[in-house]
Image (spheres, helix red, strand yellow):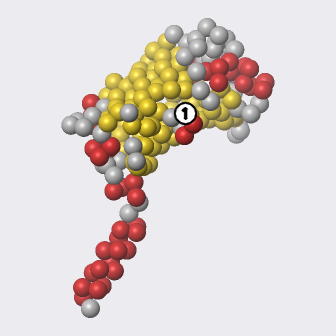
Amino acid sequence: MHKRILGLVAVAACLVVPAAAAVSLGDAAGSYTISPAASSIRFTVGKAGGGGFDGAFARFKGNIRIDNSDVERSRVNITIFPESVGTGQNRIDAFLRSDAVFDAANNPEIQFRSTSVNRTSATTAVIDGRLTARGKTFPEKFTAELDGLKSGTIKFHVTGKVLRSRYGMDVGTPLYSNVVDFDMTLTGRRG
Protein backbone atom coordinates (compact mmCIF):
# COMPACT_ATOMS: atom_id res chain seq x y z
CA MET A 1 0.00 0.00 0.00
CA HIS A 2 2.83 2.34 0.93
CA LYS A 3 4.57 1.73 -2.46
CA ARG A 4 1.31 2.42 -4.29
CA ILE A 5 0.86 5.77 -2.53
CA LEU A 6 4.46 6.76 -3.30
CA GLY A 7 3.92 5.78 -6.95
CA LEU A 8 0.81 7.97 -7.17
CA VAL A 9 2.68 10.88 -5.55
CA ALA A 10 5.51 10.51 -8.09
CA VAL A 11 3.05 10.50 -11.02
CA ALA A 12 1.23 13.55 -9.60
CA ALA A 13 4.54 15.38 -9.18
CA CYS A 14 5.42 14.73 -12.83
CA LEU A 15 2.07 16.15 -13.94
CA VAL A 16 2.60 19.34 -11.90
CA VAL A 17 6.08 20.08 -13.32
CA PRO A 18 5.81 21.94 -16.65
CA ALA A 19 7.25 20.15 -19.69
CA ALA A 20 9.79 22.96 -20.30
CA ALA A 21 11.23 22.42 -16.82
CA ALA A 22 12.48 19.00 -17.93
CA VAL A 23 14.68 20.72 -20.55
CA SER A 24 17.52 22.95 -19.41
CA LEU A 25 19.51 25.57 -21.26
CA GLY A 26 22.45 23.17 -21.17
CA ASP A 27 20.38 20.56 -23.07
CA ALA A 28 19.67 23.16 -25.76
CA ALA A 29 23.31 23.71 -26.77
CA GLY A 30 23.80 24.51 -30.45
CA SER A 31 23.24 27.18 -33.08
CA TYR A 32 19.76 28.23 -34.17
CA THR A 33 18.40 30.53 -36.86
CA ILE A 34 15.37 32.53 -35.74
CA SER A 35 12.28 31.69 -37.80
CA PRO A 36 10.22 34.88 -38.33
CA ALA A 37 7.19 32.82 -39.34
CA ALA A 38 7.15 31.09 -35.94
CA SER A 39 8.30 34.13 -33.91
CA SER A 40 6.96 37.55 -32.93
CA ILE A 41 8.43 40.82 -31.70
CA ARG A 42 5.67 42.85 -30.01
CA PHE A 43 5.83 46.09 -28.06
CA THR A 44 3.61 48.40 -26.02
CA VAL A 45 3.88 52.14 -25.40
CA GLY A 46 1.66 53.39 -22.58
CA LYS A 47 -0.14 56.73 -22.44
CA ALA A 48 -0.75 59.03 -19.48
CA GLY A 49 -4.25 58.44 -18.17
CA GLY A 50 -4.40 54.96 -19.76
CA GLY A 51 -4.41 53.62 -23.25
CA GLY A 52 -1.41 53.89 -25.52
CA PHE A 53 -0.77 51.51 -28.36
CA ASP A 54 0.57 48.06 -29.15
CA GLY A 55 2.59 47.13 -32.18
CA ALA A 56 4.78 44.50 -33.75
CA PHE A 57 7.54 44.14 -36.31
CA ALA A 58 6.74 41.87 -39.25
CA ARG A 59 10.32 41.59 -40.52
CA PHE A 60 13.35 40.56 -38.50
CA LYS A 61 16.13 38.00 -38.55
CA GLY A 62 18.66 36.62 -36.13
CA ASN A 63 20.45 33.73 -34.57
CA ILE A 64 20.96 32.19 -31.16
CA ARG A 65 24.03 30.22 -30.14
CA ILE A 66 23.92 28.36 -26.85
CA ASP A 67 27.39 27.33 -25.73
CA ASN A 68 27.63 23.66 -24.76
CA SER A 69 30.28 24.05 -22.07
CA ASP A 70 29.27 27.44 -20.65
CA VAL A 71 25.77 28.91 -21.13
CA GLU A 72 27.14 32.31 -20.07
CA ARG A 73 29.21 32.40 -23.30
CA SER A 74 26.10 32.04 -25.45
CA ARG A 75 25.17 34.71 -28.01
CA VAL A 76 22.01 36.31 -29.43
CA ASN A 77 21.94 38.54 -32.51
CA ILE A 78 18.74 40.10 -33.83
CA THR A 79 18.13 42.57 -36.66
CA ILE A 80 14.74 44.30 -36.88
CA PHE A 81 13.55 46.16 -39.98
CA PRO A 82 11.58 49.18 -38.66
CA GLU A 83 9.72 49.79 -41.94
CA SER A 84 7.79 46.61 -41.05
CA VAL A 85 6.27 48.13 -37.90
CA GLY A 86 2.52 47.66 -37.58
CA THR A 87 -0.03 48.81 -35.02
CA GLY A 88 -3.21 48.23 -37.00
CA GLN A 89 -3.54 52.01 -37.45
CA ASN A 90 -2.09 53.35 -40.72
CA ARG A 91 -1.60 56.89 -39.36
CA ILE A 92 0.43 55.66 -36.37
CA ASP A 93 2.41 53.22 -38.55
CA ALA A 94 3.41 56.04 -40.95
CA PHE A 95 4.37 58.25 -37.99
CA LEU A 96 6.52 55.51 -36.42
CA ARG A 97 8.34 54.96 -39.75
CA SER A 98 8.92 58.72 -40.20
CA ASP A 99 12.01 60.68 -39.15
CA ALA A 100 10.18 61.62 -35.93
CA VAL A 101 10.59 58.08 -34.57
CA PHE A 102 12.41 55.23 -36.41
CA ASP A 103 13.51 57.25 -39.46
CA ALA A 104 13.28 53.96 -41.36
CA ALA A 105 14.33 55.54 -44.67
CA ASN A 106 17.74 56.53 -43.25
CA ASN A 107 18.04 53.85 -40.56
CA PRO A 108 16.72 50.64 -42.11
CA GLU A 109 17.88 48.35 -39.29
CA ILE A 110 17.70 48.10 -35.51
CA GLN A 111 20.29 45.69 -34.14
CA PHE A 112 20.73 43.88 -30.85
CA ARG A 113 24.00 42.06 -30.17
CA SER A 114 24.40 40.26 -26.86
CA THR A 115 27.51 40.81 -24.77
CA SER A 116 26.73 38.30 -22.01
CA VAL A 117 24.16 35.74 -20.97
CA ASN A 118 23.69 35.21 -17.23
CA ARG A 119 21.81 32.09 -16.28
CA THR A 120 19.22 32.68 -13.54
CA SER A 121 17.76 29.15 -13.40
CA ALA A 122 17.80 25.93 -15.43
CA THR A 123 15.44 27.51 -17.98
CA THR A 124 15.94 31.29 -17.61
CA ALA A 125 18.66 33.83 -18.30
CA VAL A 126 19.27 37.57 -18.42
CA ILE A 127 20.74 38.71 -21.72
CA ASP A 128 22.86 41.87 -21.71
CA GLY A 129 23.76 43.46 -25.00
CA ARG A 130 24.06 46.52 -27.16
CA LEU A 131 21.03 47.88 -28.99
CA THR A 132 21.64 50.15 -31.98
CA ALA A 133 18.82 52.31 -33.38
CA ARG A 134 19.00 55.59 -35.32
CA GLY A 135 22.80 55.45 -35.14
CA LYS A 136 22.86 55.39 -31.34
CA THR A 137 24.06 52.39 -29.32
CA PHE A 138 23.32 51.71 -25.65
CA PRO A 139 23.44 48.71 -23.31
CA GLU A 140 20.09 46.98 -22.81
CA LYS A 141 18.91 43.95 -20.84
CA PHE A 142 16.29 41.32 -21.65
CA THR A 143 14.99 38.30 -19.75
CA ALA A 144 14.63 35.01 -21.64
CA GLU A 145 12.75 31.89 -20.59
CA LEU A 146 13.10 28.59 -22.43
CA ASP A 147 9.58 27.61 -23.55
CA GLY A 148 10.47 24.40 -25.33
CA LEU A 149 12.97 22.30 -27.22
CA LYS A 150 11.75 19.68 -29.66
CA SER A 151 13.11 18.11 -32.84
CA GLY A 152 15.80 20.74 -33.46
CA THR A 153 13.48 23.67 -32.70
CA ILE A 154 13.91 25.93 -29.66
CA LYS A 155 11.45 28.49 -28.33
CA PHE A 156 12.06 31.39 -25.94
CA HIS A 157 9.78 33.98 -24.34
CA VAL A 158 11.77 37.22 -24.07
CA THR A 159 10.76 40.43 -22.27
CA GLY A 160 12.42 43.76 -21.61
CA LYS A 161 12.03 47.51 -21.30
CA VAL A 162 13.81 50.12 -23.45
CA LEU A 163 13.90 53.89 -22.94
CA ARG A 164 13.12 55.36 -26.36
CA SER A 165 14.57 58.80 -25.53
CA ARG A 166 18.09 57.33 -25.55
CA TYR A 167 17.69 56.69 -29.26
CA GLY A 168 16.25 60.09 -30.19
CA MET A 169 12.67 58.79 -30.31
CA ASP A 170 11.21 60.79 -27.43
CA VAL A 171 8.54 62.59 -29.47
CA GLY A 172 5.25 62.67 -27.56
CA THR A 173 6.73 62.36 -24.08
CA PRO A 174 5.48 62.77 -21.41
CA LEU A 175 2.00 62.12 -22.84
CA TYR A 176 3.26 58.80 -24.22
CA SER A 177 5.55 56.76 -22.01
CA ASN A 178 9.29 56.90 -22.55
CA VAL A 179 9.36 53.17 -21.71
CA VAL A 180 8.74 50.66 -24.49
CA ASP A 181 7.75 47.23 -23.17
CA PHE A 182 8.89 44.36 -25.39
CA ASP A 183 7.27 40.94 -25.38
CA MET A 184 8.81 38.49 -27.84
CA THR A 185 8.48 34.88 -28.82
CA LEU A 186 11.66 33.71 -30.56
CA THR A 187 11.60 30.32 -32.22
CA GLY A 188 14.84 29.03 -33.70
CA ARG A 189 15.68 26.08 -35.89
CA ARG A 190 18.95 24.24 -35.37
CA GLY A 191 21.49 24.54 -38.12
Q: Is residue 47 visible?
A: no
Identity of the residue furthest to the top in this view: 106
Q: Secondary structure at mark 1?
A: helix
According to the image, label 1 marks what residue? Answer: 36
Q: Percent x, y for residue 46?
A: 65, 35
Is residue 1 depicted above or below 30 in this figure? below
Q: Is residue 123 left or right of residue 179?
A: left
Residue 39 appears in the picture as rendered:
yes
Q: Which residue is more in the foreground, 137 or 26? A: 26
Q: Amino acid at mark 1?
A: Pro
* Left or right of 143 in this view: 174: right
Quadrant position of the C terminus in the picture = top left
Q: Quadrant of the N terminus?
A: bottom left
Q: Quadrant of residue 116?
A: top left
Furthest residue in direction left, as rendered? 69
Image coordinates of residue 141 in percent, x first then y, are 42, 30
Would you identify the image quadrant in which residue 119 lies? Answer: top left
Please report the residue visible at 39 percent of the width from the left and 54 percent of the height from the top.
20
Q: Is residue 171 above or below residue 51?
A: above
- Give the crowd class for mark 1: few <14, some 14-19, many >=20 residues within 10 Å: some
Q: Nearer the viewer, residue 10 or 33?
A: 33
Q: Position of residue 155 (x, y in %)?
A: 45, 43
Q: Nearer the viewer, residue 35 or 172?
A: 35
